[in-house]
Amino acid sequence: MKSALITGGARGIGLATAKGLMAEGWRVAILDRDRAALDEARGELPGALGIEADVSIPADVERTVAEVTSAFGGLDGLVNNAGVADFGPIRETTYDRWQRVMRTNLDGPFLMTQAFTDLLASDGGGAVVNITSISGLRASTLRVAYGTSKAALAQLTLQQAAELGELGIRVNAVAPGPVATKLAMAVHSPEIIAAYHDALPLNRYGKEDEIAAAINFLLSDKASFITGQILAADGGFAAVGIGLPALRAMAQDI
């Protein structure tokens, strides 16, 4: 039976990914630093291992390796999904805010993949999927820290793929476009939602389980010869661009 660890697994895309994998017979561990959300998610995932940890803290990462090794003995898939969304104008993005985003969105996937390399390689190789963002492939306002962290994570994906392939470990990334998560719906104004709809060929936000399906494909044996790729699951957003009037108006109002 295959096993996977999903960071940021207590909600949203991470939780949807865990549900999809368990439906396919995988053993799953979900990691989150929010204990209450983790407990709630485990209620939806009978048999899943829950790990309370922060991916930006090396000691937590090392403890996670020990817990996963004890529970599963090996690891076939690692999904680096934990992330921090911090949106604001460049002039109002303090260094502390910048660092907070980078620690989770970039340092976390680096630390986790490095720490789990031996376990992923131990049985002929596994797969890593980093969750970047369409904001890492193209710029838009208010995302100086978030977008930069995700662009750097895309490059980290390529570096990991180039080096870890020798160990049989595949590393890819999924770059979601606008997805109808609780967070997105809370921070996207009606004007922003309308602007995205105008720019998306599919004329709608994505669903969490649609992103999860892309992640789970890249973890699966069906993707056995795919590595070093950034898959944009974005409803065609990257293909056509987006108009900026609503975003600029919002930035001027802040």
Image: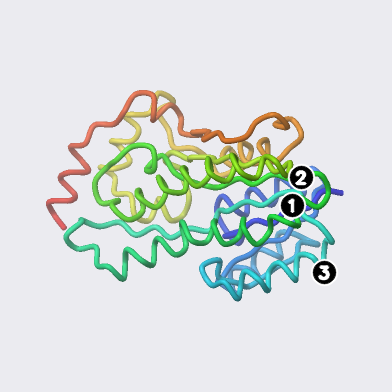
Q: Residue at x 62, y 69 (%)?
A: 61
Q: Secondary structure at mark 2?
A: loop
Instruction: Answer left or right for 56 relative to 199.
Output: right
> In this rendering, is residue 251 above or below 221?
below
* Label 1 crowd (10 A; few <14 / some 14-19 / many >=20): many
Contact (Cβ within 8 Å) of mark 1 with mark 2: yes
Amino acid found under the numbered disc labelled 2: Gly
Question: SS for tag 3?
Answer: helix
Q: Which residue is mark 2?
A: 125
Identify the residue at image location x=43%, y=60%.
84
Q: Secondary structure at mark 1?
A: helix
Q: Residues within 10 Å of mark 2 (few under 14, many from 20)?
A: many
Q: On screen, 58 above or below 84?
A: below
Residue position marked by numbered label 3 in the rendering: 70
Give the vertical position of 88 relative to 216 (above or below): below
Q: Residue, x 79% and y 65% (percent of image)?
A: 69
Left or right: residue 95 versus residue 174 is: left
Using the image, tell me which numbered label, if any, was put on residue 236: none
Picture disc at residue 120: 1
Q: Which quadrant of the rendered structure holds the C terminus? A: bottom left
Q: Position of residue 232 (x, y in %)?
A: 49, 33
| Disc with the residue nearer the chain's start (2 vs 3) | 3
Amino acid type at image mark 1: Leu
Q: Earlier in the sequence, mark 3 or mark 1?
A: 3
* First of labels 1, 2 by sequence position: 1
